[in-house]
Amino acid sequence: MTDLEAALRRAVRGEVGFDVTSRALTTMDASNYRRVPLGVVAPRDADDVAAVLEVCRAHGVPVVPRGGGTSIAGQATGTGVVLDFTRHMNRLVALDPDARTAVVQPGLVLDRLQQAAAPHGLRFGPDPSTHSRCTLGGMIGNNSCGSHSVAWGTTADSVRELTVLTARGRSLRLGQGWAGAPEGLRELVSGDLARLRTGFPDLPRRISGYALDALLPERGADVARSFCGAEGTLGVLTEAVVRLVEAPRARALAVLGYADEAGAAEAAAGLLPLGPLTVEGMAVDLVPSTQGLPRGGAWLFVETGGDSAAQARAGAEAVVRAAEDAVDALVVTDPAGQRALWRIREDASGTATRMPDGAEAWPGWEDCAVPPARLGAYLRDFRALLTAHGLRGTPYGHFGDGCIHVRIDFDLLTDAGVARFRRFSEELADVVVAHGGSLSGEHGDGQARAELLPRMYGGETVALFERAKAVWDPDDLLNPGMLVRPAPLDTNLRFSVLPREPVDVEFGYPSDGGDFSAAVRRCVGVAKCRTTSVSGSGVMCPSFRATGEEEHSTRGRARLLHEMLAGELVTDGWRSPEVRDALDLCLSCKGCRSDCPVEVDMATYKAEFLHHHYAGRRRPAAHYAMGWLPVWLRWAARTRVAPVVNALASVGPLAAVAKRLGGIAGEREVPRLAGETFSRWWRRRGRPVGEGELVVLWPDTFTEHLSPSVGRAAVRVLEAAGLRVVLPPTLRGRAVVGDGTSRSAASLLTARRGRVCCGLTYVSTGQLDRARAVMRRTLDLMAPVLETSAPVVVLEPSCAAALRTDLPELLHDDPRAARLAARVVTFAEALERHAPDWRPPALNLPAVGQTHCHQHAVLGDAADRRLREAAGLSGELSGGCCGLAGNFGFEKGHYEVSAACAEDQLLPAVREAPEGAVVLADGFSCRTQLEQLAGTRGRHLAEVLAEGLDQA
């Protein structure tokens, strides 16, 4: 233990982390930069903060305050001690509806403040797109804005008082009239009044540099306001009194279509006199689908508010009338429709990291701002500069404030590319200044732009910034290298430590050119995975919501993988215990594959890591017990010992021994094996019924051995819909598609027996060699099916997802894999596509339950929604993950997290279900979790429809 670490442990009551994991999780924020800290401290209160400052000052070690870690300019990284306020100092201390103020700690997430204020008809005005995970301390440090700044201003406009600790441990309460000013600040300002009155651009989004002009006497000598945007370089915030605003009771959204972004930009300023809440711009490059949008190549999203829906709509219609240059327009009053449109805008910071052709794009010039009236001209010059440097970017953002966000396809992996990044940055700074703008219009300067501040302010004003820093922090202890005396903008790049040659891996990573490093680079730190609640059918990230720990978020795991590839901090490579432990609580729910704006696929990365980590080594017992589950279940079926196994599993001591040997959680009950497998029932039933279109029903392991009732119900419904159901061949060779057994004399002489399997359990436990062998055997068996046009109906969502994604990505060298993946359909898709005229029985019942996480992430549930609606099953299914997640919830050490995941969405939805509601759960894991934790029987949609047919 180092002297510094020992001293901090003696002085601080909060957690002190100098271990590899704690440091690796804070090497980066959402910027292009990386710094390795000495350690991380999670202070419990202001006394802890003061103790950290005292110890670090004695050791000459810098201190870096950090909130949600979503800063885009590098200011939340550092080489000293990082203060993590999100763990303990995250409370809403008080809320006064009458005074319209709130007292908050720096680690409070913005959405929690909004939720507390909403019942009083109030809200905090600024709302960055990261509102579900950014903290108030970070917002004050960066002077954050958000889409509603045209109505409610920046964070500085919403701050009343700030309690801060100086680097030398003095507690100050900052406010107007020089309240809390450190000694020497007043004299510094009075000695340079002329410069402060003339040297700062007058525009709504001027965030760059220190806001020393707020200290002018005619502006109230507001020390709290001048502290906003200081990026943790002047003092450490411990508490804030912030102003709340009245939230409109109703809102409407006018969506205006323009020919291009320049046209939209030029129109934005003209709409401001109408008093809109937002004027946001976005071009077609960032919109996944233009369905539901008016015609155009770019759009303005103009939100209006009012005391009633009619008043809000009237405001939106007035905007449409005023937008004479728009080629098309649409007014959206439906709250769900507005949320869907805003979600596109909020995800842009992630989706913009990939160009339309899949090339990477990066921040660095994320949020320059110019006077709104100059925005159109600035955008044209900006586009011209991109072209001159051979670069591409997709601008979007706060057009009403003249602030543009953009990610650019810089090559930050080669020396030549980094040199071009520097040249472009210098030239763009000059373009921004020529238009009267600010290098930063929202996210701060950090390392990305601070070096260029002399181009904006001139050398003398920057020297004044340095003198102000010295007044507050004479020892240069707080976040050195930011704002004043900055590190060069092309140093400390996080990509420089990654391997230059592709890493040898098993999966194909088709979206990343087969490069595992590129796959890991996908995570840019947007941190949508750190949200504490999900909306709608969202899933990501259930383990983070259960533990609240960064290492259990998708971002945290990606950071550890990044450090593993870098080899500087995590030195064991694929053998790293730190990476293994962080991935251990990943449920492989695949939620990040769809919910992460940049489509990080942590389930695949986990399988890849486990494959390499355990190569040539003994695996955990659960990998053999659960990973090889298809083998054990087939053996039990072949020897007809299911009754014996069930009987033994019901004997407590025997079951306890078996679970201990198999690495299974002692709290879990062992699921009962079916007395008759689905395939055996199929053979006993006889040949297929009907002459309709042929569909191949996949007998997955769970349906075959644990829930054959689901398979029987699916056959009943599919045949009622006029389809001819068959099972896959069970012999390799000259098999016959049609009866699921292929027992012709020729086949028996020339082929080997086998059973199809998606390989899911082997993939989820990282046994990729075995998974590949199982998948190849499956493709051999399915060869006759692939010669037909028959769809393959898969009832278990996790198996369908494995066939759709894991199969072609693991067997990327076998063209049959992609062909089979393209044939896979869900139960609802099969009925919708291949029996479009069939109508399900009218059940007319409420339905509750949870959309399977793999269905949400990979397969989509649109067809299921339509089928439920046609059957009269009303109500929305919840999002999240059931928490059992195949083998995850059964493994020893996972029970508490598994149960917490179920309590997040699924179990409350079932408890609150109306009387007589149908509990839907298409996944075997979901049904098992419901049965074991809630004593509730969930049913596959096929079972519910089959029962309806029988009743009819």
Image (cartoon, rainbow, N blue to C red):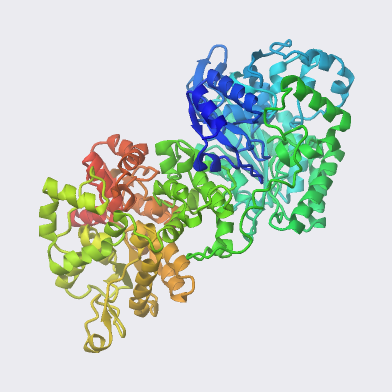
Q: Quarter-wise, where is residue 366 in the image?
A: top right
Quadrant, the C terminus:
bottom left
> Which residue shows up at 75% across the image and 42% down it?
265
* Depth order, front residue of 229/717: 229
Give residue 204's position: percent from left, percent from top. Answer: 75, 29
> Which residue shows up at 28% across the image and 76% down it?
729
Q: Is residue 625 left or right of residue 342?
A: left
Count of numbered marks: 0
Q: Is residue 283 left or right of residue 471?
A: left
Look at the image and tell me whether residue 568 can be seen. Answer: yes
Look at the image and tell me whether residue 717 can be seen. Answer: no
Give residue 569's position: percent from left, percent from top. Answer: 56, 47
* Depth order, front residue of 901/768: 768
Give residue 215's position: percent from left, percent from top. Answer: 77, 17
Give residue 817's position: percent from left, percent from top. Answer: 43, 72
> Which residue shows up at 54% across the image and 47% down it?
559
> Which residue shows up at 23% across the image and 53% down it?
661
Query: Would you place residue 196 above or below residue 31 in this image?
Result: above
* Depth order, front residue of 129/231: 231
Q: Is residue 169 left or right of residue 710?
A: right
* Depth order, front residue of 919/263: 919
Query: Would you place residue 391 above or below residue 105 in this image?
Result: below
